[in-house]
Image (spheres, rainbow, N blue to C red):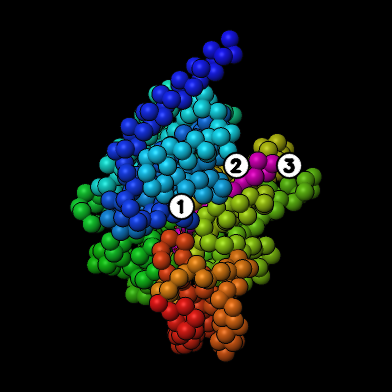
Amino acid sequence: MATTEASEHAHKYATLLDSLQDAANLYPKPEGLKYSYGTAGFRTLANLLPPVMFRVGLLAILRSKRLAGATIGVMVTASHNPEQDNGVKLVDPSGEMLEPLWELHATTLANCPSTASLLSTFMTLVSHLRVDLDQPANIVYARDTRPSSPGLVEALEAAFRAFSDGAKVVDLGITTTPILHYVVKATNDKSGESGIPTQEGYMKRMAKAFKTLIGNRGPLAPLHVDCANGVGAFALEEFSKHIGDLLPFRPINTDVKTRGALNFQCGADFVKTKQALPPSVAQSGVLSKPDTRGCSFDGDADRLVYYYLRDGKTFRLLDGDKIAGLVAMYIKDLVGRARMHENNEPLKIGVVQTAYANGSSTKYLKSRNIPVRCVPTGVKHLHHAAQLFDIGVYFEANGHGTVLFSPSCLTTLREFQPDSPESANAIKQLIALSELINQAVGDALSDMLLVEVVLAYRGWGAEEWDAGYEDLPNRLVKVEVHDRSQFVTIDAERKLQYPTGLQDHIDDAVNKFELGRSFVRPSGTEDCVRLYAEAKSTADVESLTTMVTDLLTYYGGP
Ligand code: 16G
Ligand code: MG
């Protein structure tokens, strides 16, 4: 009997390998290219990606089988990159980024030079990772609006089809990155507490929470939303059907058809990097009217920045740091009003930032007794640090972030018996917040609603929000170096360990300027190092930037 079983197995594996071989032959890896699963998955020119897609498809199946059939997500997007790029990343069952160890397996598979090496590496992974190929595999995948995405999805599907016993796959079609993360999390959460695992379920859940939080403060003033000519335009349109006039949207840059329009001179990354309005928004003049606010999504709608024109003229950016400050103070207020501390441990609220956070924002939070942690760049780092709080607010300055409620905090909130109407109301609002805010990953749509809730609660416009603190002048520049891997950071990227001696010189430069701060880190998505500098005056920032650039040229120039 055992022998029959063993031979059945052998036959099954041989059939699988045959089928994988036939499929893999259609997606050969170009010679000489080195792919790498970076901070946000694989990302490069779209025409170089079909073999990577195929291999990512294989890894998604392995990951799902390894986790006894838990649903894994695959997102095809290159976020804010130009249209000719594309990319892919995997989403773990909790809705979080792929476990770092598996990022290495993704890189290994992607770089196998031939079909034979791909198959043998695949079988080595099966055995080393103790994957039982008889387990089921469940995958949910989606793509943004890039014209190259359908072709890349075909390569992904070829991998799914190559498994003769079938991976169970769900194609969400064109949708935002955070909606895919939500669907993955909600699919795996059998308690149902994370919501219904569909785009519609997501929209309805957010709309209901938004209505609860706005209460009778609506309808709100219209909001101008720059959709970066990307998938956020669809999500916004869909969502608006669920809330009617409660918050009237004025969408801009919703052209997902014209070639080259995606992220071109628009979107959150453009606004943050240029510290200026997208020309389309400036020309339309819509922000010149008093009390008008606008915001920008990025190409896959997981980043958000706000802005307005002070006195109808001067551009003022309200970035991820400003959002974190606004939201943390609001949550602190609600928690205070809930008066839970008499019978419970006080809820720990904290903010997680990266070294890019403006020094003024960190000072603002700390001076209001909000603990602030600094972690390396990249969502996975922020997300994990935020999980250590009962309510963890995390935002990168570039507008990527969310607010996480720990499972025990949610239980406490649900079980708490309030002894006053004010406390009952605050508890209700905190629970609604946990349903409004995407618990899997940063989400431009959900974060935008969150900002609107806080502004309505405070009775503020953008200007009052902005008044909380004044950003220190700052610069972020790219510097090309011979080999960026020579730049090794420590202390959450705030200091360089290598090249030896460089940090001492940076410190000397920084010490010449009042409120000076500067750091250098290798980019995780481009072949360069990034230099950030801030100081009390714009002139000082320019001088500091020049000094550190010169040091970089000396230590690592091309
Ligand atoms: C990726 C990260 C983003 C980070 C950026 C930094 C995710 C999902 N995205 O886009 O959080 O800010 O990389 O890029 O983690 P850099 O390493 O090139 O500066
Ligand atoms: Mg993005």
Describe the element under mark 3 as helix, strand or loop: loop
Tell me the number on the disc at residue 138. none
Start-end of magenta stretch: 398-409
> Which residue appears farthest toward the bottom when viewing the image?
512
**Residue 440 visible (yes or no):** no
> How far separated are the C-alphas under marks 2 and 1?
36 Å
Describe the element under mark 1 as helix, strand or loop: loop
The residue drawn where x is 55% and y is 52% is 380
Describe the element under mark 2 as helix, strand or loop: helix
| Residue where numbered disc 2 is placed | 431
Q: Which of marks 3 and 2 precedes in the sequence?
A: 3
Dot 1 amino acid type = Tyr
Dot 3 amino acid type = Asp
Q: Which of marks 1 and 3 precedes in the sequence?
A: 1
Dot 2 amino acid type = Ile
> How far separated are the C-alphas under marks 3 and 1?
52 Å
| Residue where numbered disc 3 is placed | 419
In the foreground, 74 or 311? 74
The residue drawn where x is 32% and y is 44% is 28
The residue drawn where x is 57% and y is 37% is 129
Nearer mark to the viewer, of 2 and 1: 1
Nearer mark to the viewer, of 3 and 1: 1
Horizontal and vertical percent position of residue 38:
46, 55
Query: Is the CB atom of the residue marked by disc 2 within 8 angstroms of ligand 1's nearest atom?
Result: no
Horizontal and vertical percent position of residue 392:
62, 53
> How far separated are the C-alphas under marks 2 and 3?
17 Å
Tell me the number on the disc at residue 37. 1
CB atoms at circles 3 and 1 under 8 Å apart? no
